[in-house]
Amino acid sequence: MARPGAARYRGVMPTTDQLREIATRVGVSLSTVYRVLNGDIKGKRKDNAEKAQQIRTIAHELGYRPNAAAKAMSSGRFNCVALLLSADYGRDFLHKGAFEGIQDALQERSMHLAVARVHDAQLHDPFGGPRFLTEWMSDGLLINYGDDVPRELLHLIHEQEVPAVWLNVDLAFDTVSFDDHGAAFQATRHVIQLGHSDIYYAQYHESAHYSTAARRAGYQKAMQEAGLRSRVIHPPGGIKPADRFAFTRTWLAKDPRPTAVVGYGPEDAMNVASGALANGLTIPDDLSIVAIHDEVLDRNGFVYTTAVVDTHQAGLQAVAMLLEKIKQPQLQIPLVTIPYRLVPGLTTAKPKA
């Protein structure tokens, strides 16, 4: 049962008498109680942290609830991070693991997340475009914009001096990205070490994202180091989804036929598998396949050998980086690259003798 009058203290500081009561019960000064309830004591020492928690617990019993709006007005901080996504089709993809990592990192710090979507046209607004921090009531931005980042967006971030960290783009600073070059290199080296020499690389869609060039270069580097010839299946403009099955059957029927294929992503690996099976090939005896993905590629229990990246870790790293940027907005933090790991599955084996 709540104490009489408890509801009066929601969102406001307890009365002086109540502050004194808290101080007496915890054995600290009145000023200490006031600072703790205003969030000024972080409690780095164990005993300080325990007393700070006692103060908050007793204040909660008295009906005190922190007023986020009042705290923001007094501190100039909203205790909020905004996640910026493009509202234009094809550029708003965000890994589920990265989103969960962002949420987990913020919850651990008692912060919250706001999500905003912006059309490119808004960036050309004659009145200066979005006021990222003031209008969205955030302390900093996490930006997940896919490929073809508009120059106007970069300009606005710089002009407004916004603490910002980018996800999954090709920038040298203030960015958390993935080692896509290393992913394709690992995938290719895996089948080379199994004894394959006729290894193709397949990508069926067109994309301006940096991973297109990075993964292709990783494959080519592994082939070059092994003294093998690179063969890339990546038609200009890409292949429409409806045409991919027939396209795969055709090139897999030609000589020389590969004994292994590295797919840019899960769809490419599965397209190759479908075409191979339709041509009477068995996997992995006749054809080994490696996929690159954000999780082990598993289709109805058929587990592909996959180069996997921990996107959850990317979300955690992005928040940690942004908090440093909020403290020091002018600081340039070097790119953090999240590595892939090769997880063997049912789709790779030594080539037939």
Image (tube, grey):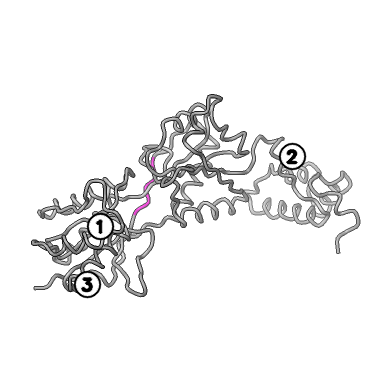
Residue 198 as seen in the image, left or right of residue 58? left
Q: Residue at x 28, y 66 (%)?
A: 305
The reply to whether callout 2 and callout 3 are in contact (CB within 8 Å) is no
Residue 313 has which mark?
none
Mark 1 or 3: the one toward you: 3
Mark 3 lies on residue: 283
Mark 1 lies on residue: 186
- Residue type at tag 2: Ala
Q: Residue at x 47, y 46 (%)?
A: 318
> How far apart are the two marked residues, 2 and 1, measured between alpha carbons?
52 Å
Q: Earlier in the sequence, mark 1 or mark 3?
A: 1
Q: Residue at x 35, y 75 (%)?
A: 301
Near-viewer residue (119 or 214)? 119
Mark 2 lies on residue: 70
Question: Is residue 338 covered in magenta?
Answer: yes
**Would you identify the image quadrant in which residue 282 lies?**
bottom left
Q: Residues within 10 Å of mark 2 (few under 14, many from 20)?
A: few
Residue 35 to residue 350: above or below = above
- Residue type at tag 1: Gln
Q: Residue at x 59, y 50 (%)?
A: 109
Residue 119: percent from the left, percent from the top?
Answer: 49, 38
Mark 2 or 3: the one toward you: 3
Residue 6: percent from the left, percent from the top?
Answer: 86, 54
Residue 14 as seen in the image, left or right of residue 35? right
